């Protein structure tokens, strides 16, 4: 697979436990202080032991000044697209253009919890269709113009005024693993977000190929889709697998993914260790940037 040439971004995926309300805010502070580019929060609104993702993102956005913020990934069944569009636009306005929207269908294994909260009953295929409708609605509500009318299988809008409007073109990055969702990513998404515990590096190529073919068939360039990767790892003295080793090994492995799989956004999965965040920002990210820049320019790192 090619290097799509995007600028590199590095960030953290934080958990928002209710029993440590300031914990995620402090780790977000550390993320920015360590030179990283993005803070994201997982989104499981059916778990009362978690703080609300969107509310916590607003606090993190107010506490920081440079990093982008995003849900990783917003749970569509419990967050209607009209509400998501307005929440995202509001946060983008308040942060001066630092919000990106990560979006997912909702994990099928969590559907009992979604139903218990009053969410819709959807099978896998219906979930994909609903997400495609939601992306259309969100983008139309971000675009000045006539009232929005939409008649879909899962959502209906009957003359909704668009707005508020983001101050930058918010990316919609979609979580996907199965072929049908990957094809949707290729057709309409701004980015693709898998996680390494569920899609290891050796499986990226096949999924990338599905996205690229779908993008081309939809009249898009494959590089229109950013490749975002939530990566899990542990620093160790010796190397024993993907991101299991010292910082130089991490840098080599992530550089290879950038140059051969087109990954341009690396997000540290379940980043709950200050030391790991610090090393990711201060040791790994600069080394990856340096090696990728050298490869792109044809010089030695």
Image: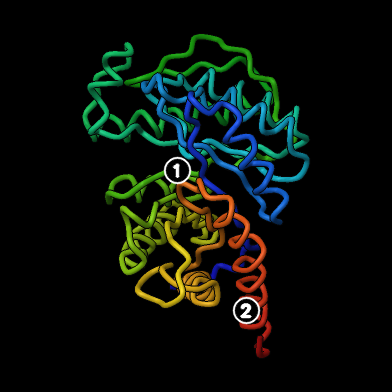
**Is residue 151 found left or right of 83 in the rendered image?**
left
Across and down, in percent, residue 215 comes to 44, 55
Q: Which residue is mark 1?
A: 174
Foreground pick, 47 / 5: 47
Q: Residues within 10 Å of mark 2 (few under 14, many from 20)?
A: many
Judged from the image, the secondary structure of the residue bearing numbered disc 2 is helix
Foreground pick, 301 / 250: 250
**Quadrant of the image occupied by residue 114:** top left
Q: Which residue is mark 2?
A: 291
Q: Which residue occupies 33% across, 62% down?
A: 200
Q: Which residue occupies 45% across, 28% down?
A: 134
Report the Cα–Cα distance between label 1 and label 2.
28 Å
Across and down, in percent, residue 282 comes to 67, 64
**Is residue 201 found left or right of 257 in the rendered image?**
left
Which mark is drawn over residue 94? Answer: none
Foreground pick, 197 / 223: 197
**Quadrant of the image occupied by residue 125:** top left
Residue 292's place in the image compared with 62, above or below, is: below
For marks 1 and 2, the one nearer the N-term is: 1
Foreground pick, 121 / 243: 243
Residue 182's place in the image compared with 41, above or below, is: below
**Quadrant of the image occupied by residue 115:** top left
Judged from the image, the secondary structure of the residue bearing numbered disc 1 is strand
Quarter of the image that includes the N terminus:
bottom left
Across and down, in percent, residue 226 comes to 53, 55
Observer-side mark, 1 or 2, equals 2
Across and down, in percent, residue 27 comes to 61, 42
**Tag count:** 2
């Amino acid at each position: 697979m090619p290097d799509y040439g995007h600028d590199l971004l590095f960030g953290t995926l934080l958990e928002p436990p209710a029993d440590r309300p300031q914990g995620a805010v402090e780790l977000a502070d550390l993320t920015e202080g360590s030179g990283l580019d993005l803070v994201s929060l997982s989104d499981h609104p059916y778990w009362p032991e978690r703080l609300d993702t969107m509310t916590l993102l607003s606090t993190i956005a107010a506490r920081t000044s440079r990093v982008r913020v995003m849900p990783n990934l917003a749970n569509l069944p419990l967050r209607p697209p009209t509400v998501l569009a307005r929440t995202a636009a509001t946060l983008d306005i308040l942060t001066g253009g630092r919000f990106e929207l990560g979006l997912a269908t909702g994990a099928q294994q969590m559907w009992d919890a979604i139903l218990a909260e009053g969410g819709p009953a959807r099978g896998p295929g219906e979930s994909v269709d609903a997400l495609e409708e939601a992306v259309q609605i969100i983008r139309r509500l971000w675009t000045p113009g006539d009232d929005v009318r939409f008649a879909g299988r899962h959502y209906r809008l009957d003359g909704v005024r668009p707005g508020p409007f983001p101050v930058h073109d918010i990316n919609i990055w979609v979580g996907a693993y199965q072929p049908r969702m990957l094809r949707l990513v290729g057709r309409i998404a701004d980015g693709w977000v898998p996680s390494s515990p569920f899609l290891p590096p050796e499986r990226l190529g096949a999924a990338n190929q599905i996205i690229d073919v779908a993008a081309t068939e939809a009249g898009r360039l494959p590089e229109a889709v950013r490749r975002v990767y939530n990566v899990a790892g542990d620093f160790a003295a010796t190397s024993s697998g993907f991101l299991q080793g010292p910082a130089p090994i991490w840098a080599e492995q992530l550089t290879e993914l950038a140059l051969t799989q087109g990954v341009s956004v690396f997000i540290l999965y379940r980043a709950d260790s200050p030391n790991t965040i610090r090393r990711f920002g201060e040791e790994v990210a600069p080394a990856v940037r340096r090696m990728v820049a050298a490869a792109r320019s044809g010089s030695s790192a």
